[in-house]
């Protein structure tokens, strides 16, 4: 490849590279992504063939889903509201994945391990910087720690996959470091849901891995947990004690805790779910909550939250039957791809990421947060695209 071809490939790959790296450094990332996508479109006008783009769209079923989700989001925005960050991510990814050439996707697959290592490094730097250098509590981080740690859990389990998969000692060392610091970033963020999702995905990785690799996985995971646990003992112990005290408070009838608030919010969601709609309530859900409170069906504390702290409830209430179907299709796409090609190479990663998001969605809304949504969409697109590279 000459310099001109290298530059051309880099420009085509840059939006994806940004979604693995720079996207997780600032709260304004979705707006930056819009600028990058517009630049990509302008470049594509002079370099891509319209017929080839149309052919690519026909072949890429994940792109169909992105366009359907984008259209639904835009229509919902006009009717009763939809998150701006989500819309930016959906539309930008729909445009980008429609136009990116097949050879660029292959290039991204070949270098996926390096992108994941970079993601782990950025995840650790971000959490370490705000926690230890600026001494800012997790609740005050510029980016919400819950979707951020979902991203962290995703890249952490992927780095472990590459650690046990590759034979190159240099890459093994790099992935060991990536796995360790990625895991550490989750501990630093003190996000219980993401930690749980990581452990469950690790169990599935263990189950789906060949027998001769199982001992290696157990050794690496236990070593990482032991080492990182010692380094972050204070934070781990603090979060453990907080969780234990919250459970005791709930058992005694006190719901004025983080977990107690979630229980009250879920109750509100359950009551609203009894009267489902096609496109949901959008931002008018607050009025519906107020009506439930007036009827004495929910507590006052459950009325004015931004969301229902559960992706499935939140999507069903705010986006209705159509929204929940789109959500299920997004979750199922990587798993379906894995089953379709019978677990060839990278397709296993799609299953692991789906598990991360399925579990995280029980207590958070990763598909409604631009940061976690952006990673899931670009990664799932790459994994479910044609041809496989280790």
Image: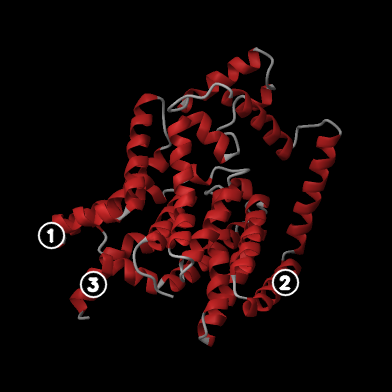
Name the residue at 68% across, 51% down.
192
In front of the other: label 1 or label 2?
2
Q: Which residue is mark 3?
A: 7
Q: CA distance from mark 1 to mark 2?
A: 52 Å
Asked if marks 3 and 2 touch (Cβ < 8 Å), the reply is: no
Query: Does residue 22 appear in the picture of this structure?
Result: no
Q: Which residue is mark 2?
A: 222
Asked if marks 1 and 2 touch (Cβ < 8 Å), the reply is: no
In the rendered picture of this protein, how many numbered marks are placed on residues? 3
At which x and y percent is residue 233?
Answer: 76, 63
Name the residue at 65% across, 17% down.
293
At which x and y percent is residue 75?
Answer: 34, 31
Name the residue at 75% across, 52% down.
239
Q: CA distance from mark 3 to mark 2?
A: 43 Å
Q: Which mark is residue 123?
A: none
- Circle 2 crowding by C-alpha within 10 Å: few under 14, some 14–19, many from 20: few
Of all residues, the one furthest to the top in this rendering is 295
Q: Which residue is mark 1?
A: 46
Q: Nearer the viewer, residue 297 or 242?
A: 297
- Circle 3 crowding by C-alpha within 10 Å: few under 14, some 14–19, many from 20: few
Query: Does residue 335 appear in the picture of this structure?
Result: yes
């Amino acid at each position: 490849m000459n310099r001109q071809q290298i530059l051309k490939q880099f420009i085509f790959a840059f939006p994806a590279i940004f979604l693995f790296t720079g996207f997780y450094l600032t709260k304004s990332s979705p707006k930056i992504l819009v600028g990058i996508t517009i630049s990509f479109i302008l470049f594509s006008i002079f370099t891509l063939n319209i017929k080839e783009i149309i052919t690519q769209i026909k072949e890429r079923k994940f792109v169909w889903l992105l366009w359907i989700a984008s259209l639904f989001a835009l229509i919902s925005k006009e009717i009763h509201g939809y998150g701006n960050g989500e819309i930016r991510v959906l539309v930008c990814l729909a445009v980008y994945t429609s136009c990116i050439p097949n050879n660029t996707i292959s290039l991204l697959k070949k270098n996926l391990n390096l992108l994941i290592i970079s993601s782990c490094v950025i995840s650790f730097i971000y959490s370490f910087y705000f926690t230890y250098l600026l001494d800012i509590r997790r609740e005050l981080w510029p980016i919400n720690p819950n979707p951020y740690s979902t991203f962290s859990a995703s890249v952490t389990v992927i780095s472990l996959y590459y650690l046990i998969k590759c034979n190159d000692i240099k890459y093994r060392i790099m992935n060991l470091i990536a796995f360790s610091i990625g895991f550490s970033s989750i501990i630093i963020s003190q996000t219980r849901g993401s930690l749980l999702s990581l452990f469950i995905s690790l169990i599935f990785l263990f189950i789906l891995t060949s027998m001769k690799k199982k001992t290696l996985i157990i050794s690496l995971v236990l070593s990482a947990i032991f080492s990182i646990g010692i380094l972050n003992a204070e934070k781990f112990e603090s979060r453990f004690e907080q969780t234990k005290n919250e459970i005791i408070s709930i058992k005694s009838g006190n719901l004025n805790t983080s977990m107690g608030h979630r229980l009250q919010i879920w109750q509100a969601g359950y009551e609203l779910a009894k009267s489902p709609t096609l496109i949901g309530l959008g931002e008018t859900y607050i009025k519906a909550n107020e009506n439930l409170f007036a009827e004495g069906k929910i507590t006052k504390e459950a009325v004015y939250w931004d969301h229902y702290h559960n992706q499935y409830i939140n999507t069903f209430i705010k986006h209705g039957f159509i929204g929940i179907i789109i959500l299920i299709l997004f979750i199922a796409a990587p798993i379906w791809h894995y089953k379709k090609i019978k677990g060839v190479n990278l397709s296993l990663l799609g299953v692991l990421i789906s598990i991360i998001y399925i579990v995280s969605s029980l207590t958070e809304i990763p598909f409604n947060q631009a940061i976690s949504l952006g990673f899931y969409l670009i990664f799932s697109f790459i994994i479910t695209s044609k041809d496989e590279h280790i």
